[in-house]
Image: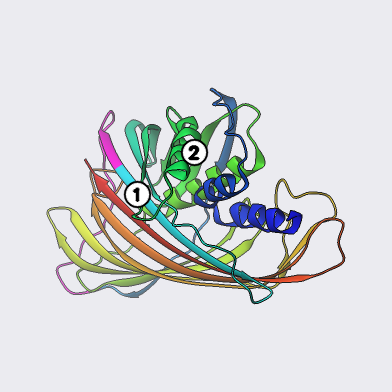
Amino acid sequence: MKKLLFISSLVLLIAGFGAKSQSTYVSANKVSEVTQPSNKSTSTSANLSLELFDPGAEPRQELRFTPAVNAKQTVAMTVDMDITMSINGQSPPQIDTPAVEIKIETQVTKVDANGDIYTDFSYSDVDVIPAPNTPPELVNTMRSQLQSLVGLQGSIIIDVQGNTKDINFDLPENLDPISEQMFEQMSNSLKQLSSPFPSEAIGVGAKWQVPNSVSINNGISINQIATYELVSLQDNIATLEVSLEQNAPPQSINLPGMPPGASVELESLDSEGQGDMTIGLSQIMPISATISLDSNTKMKVTPPNSAQEMTMDMNLLMNMNLESQ
């Protein structure tokens, strides 16, 4: 039983909040009390390179973000995760985890002379969307936990090409390691929502690629390649098709909150994703976006106070949809 609970905790640390809520429901842990935001913060920045393969057809133009100071935007982001796993070749019972919808309010606060755009954001509402077979107790548990996100504030800086230069969250005091990992994942998700444009003028059919190495808070270093194609451009509204490839080399994982004596060795991580985005150059968040990601992870796990090594395979299917309101 202890090994099963340890594995459940491991899954939630790797996969994020959806799995956290599932594991909390399975192991009947008490819901944490809601804490108020403090001055504690976490930030992340990106230093990306971009390679233009094809500038596309004429006419071409330089695509640049030009929002006005005080411009406001509300977006609804829905994340749905389906997690399956096996331990030493055997699959434990699976639970149909509901989707999560987060409403994000944004306001541009400053635009530098070089075009850098400063924006404040806050999570104004969070809700749970039950799947047909989701147990009602799990829905209630998730709703209770997710209330800690309402009112969460932060800031983001992007340049005129859409490169995310910095993201900052004002986190609650005494935040548990699992929730910190969740906020780190949200930071990485927000980075993907502002897709960088080439410095060159481009037209319909243009293709470019953005490689990136990310060290996320669950202790895994991931290599990612995002490939973009401009499929339409009219009245400063661009529609992009996106494909993602992710992989991680074998490595030791130092997960936050792991009990003493436990160890995790990543053998492989491979992900593929695809989607599309519609972007208005007068806004920093997409008008709409849809991203699907299929990720497979293989690990060797040694629980605390045990010399018995276990093999764990996990598949994560994630669908993210975003709509500007």
Find residue 139 and report its image quarter. Answer: top left
Give the image location of residue 32, x and y in percent.
Answer: 59, 31
Give the image location of residue 303, x and y in percent.
Answer: 79, 59
Q: Quadrant of the N terminus?
A: bottom right
Question: Looking at the image, which residue is at 59% across and 70% down?
Answer: 91
For the record, the magenta segment spans 56-75
Give the image location of residue 258, x and y in percent.
Answer: 74, 50
Asked whether, in this view, residue 54 is left or right of residue 257, the answer is left
Q: How is the image coloured?
A: rainbow
| Label 1–label 2 contact, CB within 8 A | no
Question: Looking at the image, which residue is at 43% across and 36% down?
Answer: 143
Amino acid on which disc 2 is placed: Thr
First along the sequence among labels 1 and 2: 1
Residue 172 vs 311, above or below: the answer is: above
Give the image location of residue 80, x and y in percent.
Answer: 39, 55
Dot 1: what SS?
strand
Pick the front one: 194 or 173? 173
Query: Is 294 inside the magenta-drawn segment?
Result: no
Pick the front one: 91 or 123? 91
Amino acid on which disc 1 is placed: Thr
Rounded to the nearest whole Å, what is the CA distance between mark 1 and mark 2? 18 Å
Dot 2: what SS?
helix
Residue under label 2: 141
Residue under label 1: 78
Query: Is 63 inside the magenta-drawn segment?
Result: yes
